Image (cartoon, rainbow, N blue to C red):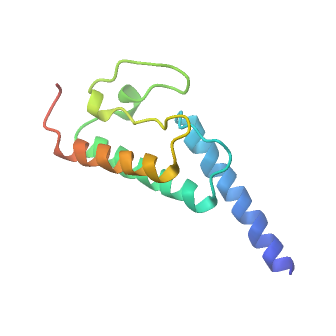
């Protein structure tokens, strides 16, 4: 029983860390996301950011600090943010589509 409690505590701690990293990127979380959903979002964000970097994008330029707006160097390279009330699956789908767009993007518009 102690092992289950330790596993649960560890899962909660890791989930809080992932949620903190996502929130720091300006991604809206409502606190009801399950651990697996947080992982899905984090992995989709990581794939998006790797695609941006592979196309020569600079995440420091293209993503604004939390709570701020900026004009990205290339609008294709700006991380899509989660809309209020948007489900995790819908947001992940948008991230996948944005990642595909970045991978096929040839230059600034």
Q: Image point 42% across, 52% down: which residue?
A: 44
Q: Looking at the image, which residue sits at the far left?
A: 106
- The front one of 60 and 72 is 72
Q: What residue is shown at x 63% (from left), y 58% (from top)?
A: 34
In the rendered image, residue 12, in percent from the top left (x then y), is placed at: 73, 59
Farthest residue in the bottom direction? 1
Q: Could you say which is closer to the camera, residue 20 or residue 84?
A: 84
Identity of the residue drawn at 52% across and 36% down: 25
Please provide percent x and percent y for residue 33.
62, 52
84 relative to 20, above or below: above
Name the foreground residue: 96 vs 106: 96
- Image position of 81 with respect to 11: above or below: above
Give the left or right position of residue 13, taking residue 63 as reference. right
Residue drawn at (30%, 41%), measured in percent from left and top? 52
Q: Horizontal and vertical percent for residue 51?
A: 29, 47
Up/down of 51 relative to 78, above or below: below
| Residue 57 in the figure: left or right of residue 26 | left
Residue 90 sits above or below residue 57 on the image: below
Q: Quadrant of the N terminus?
A: bottom right
Q: Quarter holding the C terminus?
A: top left
Residue 26 position, x and y percent, is 53, 33
User: In the displayed structure, does residue 13 sit left or right of residue 34?
Assistant: right
Q: Looking at the image, how many numbered discs can be counted on the residues? A: 0
């Amino acid at each position: 029983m102690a092992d289950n409690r330790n596993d649960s505590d560890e899962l909660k701690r890791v989930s809080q860390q992932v949620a903190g990293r996502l929130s720091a990127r300006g991604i809206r979380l409502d606190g009801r996301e399950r651990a697996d959903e947080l992982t899905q979002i984090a992995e989709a964000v990581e794939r998006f950011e790797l695609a941006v970097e592979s196309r020569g994008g600079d995440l420091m330029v293209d993503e604004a600090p939390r709570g701020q707006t900026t004009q990205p160097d290339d609008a294709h390279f700006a991380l899509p943010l989660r809309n209020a009330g948007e489900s995790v699956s819908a947001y992940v789908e948008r991230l996948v589509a944005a990642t595909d767009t970045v991978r096929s993007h040839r230059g600034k518009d």
